Image (cartoon, rainbow, N blue to C red):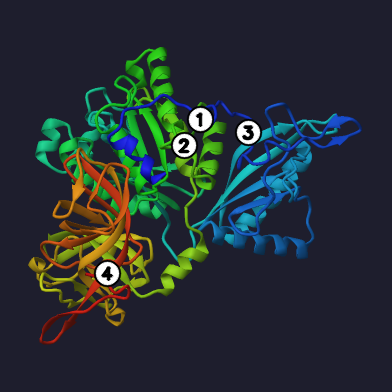
Amino acid sequence: MDSRVSELFGGCCRPAGGGAGGAMRGRGGTAPGGGGSGSKAKKKNGRSRGGKANNPPYLPPEAEDGNIEYKLKLVNPSQYRFEHLVTQMKWRLQEGRGEAVYQIGVEDNGLLVGLSEEEMRASLKTLRRMAEKVGADITVLREREVDYDSDVPRKITEVLVRKVPDNQQFLDLRVAVLGNVDSGKSTLLGVLTQGELDNGRGRARLNLFRHLHEIQSGRTSSISFEILGFNSKGEVVNYSDSRTAEEICESSSKMITFIDLAGHHKYLKTTIFGLTSYCPDFAMLVVSANTGIAGTTREHLGLAMALKVPFFIVISKVDLCSKATVERTVKQLERILKQPGCNKLPLLVNSDDDAVTAAQQFAQSPNITPIFTLSSVSGENLDLLKVFLNILPPLTNSKEQEELMQQLTEFQVDEIYTVPEVGTVVGGTLSSGICREGENLVVGPTDDGKFLRLKVCSIQRNRSACRVLRAGQAATLALGPFDRSLLRKGMVMVSPEMNPTICSVFEAEIVLLFHATTFRKGFQVTVHVGNVRQTAIVEKIHGKDKLRTGEKAVVRFRFIKHPEYLKIGAKLLFREGVTKGIGHVTDLQAIITKENGLEESLGPGQLSF
């Protein structure tokens, strides 16, 4: 895939050929999980046991891991059975970090059997008792009828169970917002987070802007964060009924943090920094219905694919266009998504049922790309996007989270502030370990490659106080009287026991996505690795004199200003003008800091000169 992402950056749009099948439109009756559609319905007495023509008779078999549980029925269980069911629910909630989905009327092998109305009512009553026992709430996502060997109508019910996990404040998902300038990104976020529709002249976005020139031009030039909460019943919590961010955090059991990025090409380095540094779980690509794929849209799509960030698409401003224009934009997107460079399967969302299906399949399959068509002025289909965001599960399970928390503390510094009466404050993401109030850490590397000791005085997460920060969470840390001039973006705060390795010279295996002529030794590029952003010079291209668009090679880079903290395997993206490339770090020439200065030594891979 990597070598063909170049089509999105520099190449022209090619007509779809050999793409991933037809667009999955209007799958109203499709079962969540989407598997088993090729299985034949089992027969009994010569009649179909599964369902209608567009209803697959099977879901994928139930997995032992994960947060999805199949239950045929839950009618009047014994006390012993009830306790067992409660324990099972606790496990599923833990796997989903506070969320679980129950499919009632489905056998463990995935066969859609269904229940009568009376059995379903009794099963939901039992499920509600189970949820109360563990301190959770349940929400019925959807009901579906199945054709089974019975004269009585039989239904399957899909239920979301949600509670705030004991070890954290709320489930937090980060969504980066991409798209061309004037596509309606900030306006859409304003409508979602403020709870009021736009007036057609950009009123909804005013609260999101951070600078006067942004208000005057109407264009985002910096990275801003907006929050949208959902309570345990799946209801939206935003600024329309909460005055402060603290109230939203307190009332929510799930939080969506939107990272509003710049659409204008002039601010591309800010957009790339937001994608690489803030580690978004998902990306939302906003496309204006009246202009279609224009400007930086293709480039932003390529960035999301290069960094392997799962993305969904929102077509905005449908109130300004005719139905034919919206359909043309949808077809244009479908054609690009299905071409070999993307190889995605578009899923157009037209109903609540589609939104539920899209959320579950999107998390399970990286090839599914949901497409929403909505208006921030009329509010058309806005609720479908909210349903999707409410159900969207986290990408990591509890086991992966636990493994990250067992490692030593590592916090990426993305923002630096000075707050009156608080002192120096840094914002960023905790990559691994656990960070507590009062903890002693070291920060660096400085320009001369050293790490400085500091103390974490207090922690805030989504603008509310927090005593413990866990791996994967974003927060701001107050450092008290620590000298701000010693800090810069791209530094890391790590545990003193880590003995961090830093380097000025490193090697990476790269793919040149686009270059006008040839890429040679001595070429200078801006390198993005996580929160690190610095100009580097190409010192050597192994086995070749030059590179052309689409070619791969192992390249040695040298930072021109100061050493950085890098890790082998980290994703790398570099650019200079129209030149762009991606890859990963394969080797480091480590620098060891000693009392009497700096001493260079070869890293584990023994770089050859």
Q: Amino acid at mark 4?
A: Leu
Considering only order in the chain, which callout, 4 or 2, is on the residue closer to the N terminus?
A: 2
Q: Amino acid at mark 3?
A: Thr
In the image, 54: left or right of 407?
Answer: right
**Rounded to the nearest whole Å, what is the CA distance between mark 4 and mark 3?**
49 Å
Disc 1 packing (10 Å; few <14; some 14–19; many ≥20): few
**Rounded to the nearest whole Å, what is the CA distance between mark 4 and mark 1?**
40 Å
Horizontal and vertical percent position of residue 220: 19, 38
**Rounded to the nearest whole Å, what is the CA distance between mark 1 and mark 2?**
9 Å
Q: Which mark is residue 343?
A: 2
Q: Which mark is residue 588?
A: 4
Q: Which residue is mark 3?
A: 30
Element type at marker 1? loop
Answer with the quarter of the image where residue 442 lies. Answer: bottom left
Q: Which residue is mark 1?
A: 18
| Residue closest to the far right | 45
**Residue 247 position (above or below residue 169):** above
Q: Nearer the viewer, mark 4 or mark 3?
A: 4
Disc 3 packing (10 Å; few <14; some 14–19; many ≥20): some
